[in-house]
């Protein structure tokens, strides 16, 4: 059952006290697994950083978490060492890839003579 369906079902049938407990447990479970659907519960806030780190540890997908951070948490980047680290690592990997391509295919460098 999808996370959205589990939450919808819980909202419909659980009393408030049990609903809060269910949401907290589900958030903890999804964060522990690094499941990006946990963002539905944490939002793209500082609460999502642990989930994103676990996702990175599990998958090695620095591109996804960097782009999520850049697009949704831009205001938090200056104050978050973790976000800055992810983005810097992603930039490094992109630049490393470009450099390798230039070494493999030097003919893609076009020299333009400007007046």
Image (cartoon, rainbow, N blue to C red):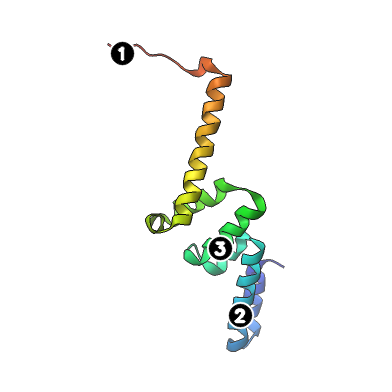
45 relative position to 64: left or right = left
Q: x%, y% of residue 84?
A: 44, 51
Residue 21, quarter of the rendered image: bottom right
Closer to us: mark 2 or mark 3?
Answer: 3
Residue that carries the numbered disc 3 in the rendered image: 50
The one of 113 and 60 positioned closer to us in this rendering: 60
Residue that carries the numbered disc 2 in the rendered image: 11
Which residue shows up at 48% across the image and 50% down it? 85
86 relative position to 15: left or right = left
Which residue shows up at 47% across the image and 54% down it? 83
Quarter holding the N terminus?
bottom right
Q: x%, y% of residue 94?
A: 52, 36
Q: Report the residue that reaches farthest toward the right.
A: 1
Residue 105 lies, with reference to residue 95, above or below; the image says above
Residue that carries the numbered disc 1 in the rendered image: 114
Which of the numbered marks, if any, corresponds to residue 62? none
Q: Looking at the image, tell me whether mark 1 or mark 2 is earlier in sequence order.
A: 2
Q: x%, y% of residue 7?
A: 63, 74
Give the structural element (helix, strand or loop) at label 1.
Answer: loop
Quarter holding the C terminus?
top left
Q: Looking at the image, tell me whether mark 2 or mark 3 is earlier in sequence order.
A: 2
Label 2 vs label 3: CA separation?
Answer: 25 Å
* Neighbourhood count class around disc 3 (C-alpha, 10 Å): few under 14, some 14–19, many 20 upward: some
For the residues bearing labels 1 and 3, Cβ distance under 8 angstroms:
no
Q: Looking at the image, tell me whether mark 1 or mark 3 is earlier in sequence order.
A: 3
């Amino acid at each position: 059952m999808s996370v959205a369906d589990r939450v919808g079902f819980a909202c419909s049938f659980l009393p408030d006290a049990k609903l809060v407990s269910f949401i907290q447990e589900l958030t903890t479970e999804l964060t522990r697994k690094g499941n990006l659907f946990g963002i539905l519960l944490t939002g793209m806030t500082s609460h999502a950083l642990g989930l994103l780190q676990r996702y990175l540890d599990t998958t090695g997908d620095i591109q996804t978490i960097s782009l999520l951070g850049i697009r949704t948490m831009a205001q938090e980047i200056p104050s978050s060492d973790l976000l800055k680290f992810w983005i810097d690592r992603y930039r490094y990997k992109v630049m490393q890839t470009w450099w390798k391509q230039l070494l493999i295919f030097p003919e893609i460098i076009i020299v333009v003579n400007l007046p």
